[in-house]
Image (cartoon, helix red, strand yellow):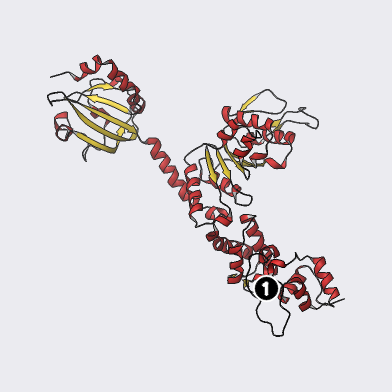
Amino acid sequence: MENIQQAIEKNELLKRLLEAIGDGVFVLDPTGKIVAWNPAMEAITGYSFKDIKGKSCRILKFSYCFGKDCPSGMHNCRILKTGKITPTECMISHRDGHALSVSKNARVIRNNRGQIIGVIETVIDLTALKNARLKMEEATRRLGELNRLDGIIAKSQVMQNVFSFIKASAASETSILIQGESGTGKELVAKAIHSIGERRNEPMITVNCSALSESLLESELFGHVKGAFTGAGRDRVGRFEQADQGTIFLDEIGDIPPYIQVKLLRVLQEKEIERVGDSLKRKVNIRIITATNKDLKSLVDKGLFREDLYYRLKVFPIYLPPLRNRREDIPLLVNHFIKLNNKISGKAVAGMAKLALKTFMEYDWPGNIRELANAIEHAFVLCSGHQIEPEDLPVEISGQNSTYAEPPQSSPEPAPPRKNQRRPLDRERLLRILRESGWNKAEAARQTGFSRAAIWKYMKKWDIPMQSE
């Protein structure tokens, strides 16, 4: 019978193939002794070929072969009868004693006469995959504790995809680029990513890159040493150093100037910074999350943003859709912000009238969730009943795409103009109309296009007396 070990040793191509395979591979002779062992097996198990050559595979203590532990000898192994083991998840023992999760696969090797001359087995290390799975499960649990992303509340499929991306980010330390229009909740997503990740107990530092000039932004991010520039009377630690071991969130990343882009690229590549006016390199261990409402690829094409930095930032991109593309989430958001404003104001508003909600559903929300939150806050100022009525809404919302009709009045009044013809109403304009009409609220309503109830509420809001003084 052929000697499988000699056959492998004579075949130089086969030896090279075994060495090149990324998964663990080893070969047994018909007696169950190990005769080949590739470098990947050494990396997985800690055993070198010299350590394990000629020994039984029982040394690895496979926990699951054909539904049970390894048999006492090769003659009892069912591989000789079945000819194969399909991929099976099991545990093996590392040389230092700890257990490893692996996927095992095996096939018998036959010669030209059909005789079994050995067994070849492959082992895939599942430890990293299992750890990532555990991190995902833990991230899912913690995500549920964040009050549904602390304001990003959704049932729409596009937002469920966003939630999935957020959970997936917990198993990685890669750079994340959050893209979306203003008001879509990019900072809330960044906070959620930090809160469910491995760095959640470390600081999260936020920097608005559009709020500072180039010189101030450089000092803010990297810090400076005493005397670096006029006014630098002492050393200052920058935001990157403050975020060490934690997360730094760079909002409006599309606004950083070219010089800062170069320095940021170095932070991403080398994980080190230099304070302004200093040549000392300081190591930082940080996760970088960036956000922008601009089209960075367009800026790259125009030469306004470095292409190499763009690709380093967008390793894991997350896109937040505008509110107009997830209208089914509007009722959930309305209820959330009503509850929030009830707590703040002490009111007991139960909800929103159907006509008012219809107006919300038809509005395009250029300011997205931030605008919706402000609209609810505005409505709380005017709302005096148990629900928000159409006249409680801001003019720019109630005056667009709204088709509700005024309820009938006890006395005839001229029909108000179409809502889309309303002019913005402010305190000075309302005062002027009231003076000219002799403080006639019905006439003020006719001229402005609002109901008398709305005129009364605006007067109360702006401290306008109910009658001429």
Quarter the C terminus occupies = bottom right
**Image quadrant where one finds the N terminus:** top left
Indicate whether 94 appears above or below 366: above
* Residue in the picture at 60% in, 51% down: 184
At which x and y percent is residue 230? 81, 30
Residue drawn at (64%, 69%), measured in percent from left and top?
A: 347
The image quadrant of residue 400 is bottom right
Please say whether residue 286 is visible from this viewpoint: no
Query: Does the image show residue 12?
Result: yes
Residue 419: % across, % down = 69, 69
Q: Quadrant of residue 20?
A: top left
| Tag 1: amino acid | Ser
Question: What is the crowding at mark 1: few (fewer than 14 residues within 10 Å), some, or many (at least 20)?
Answer: some
Front-most of 245 and 469?
469
Q: Which residue is mark 1?
A: 384
Position of residue 147 in the picture relative to residue 449 (left or right) = left
Viewer-closest of 462 and 363: 363
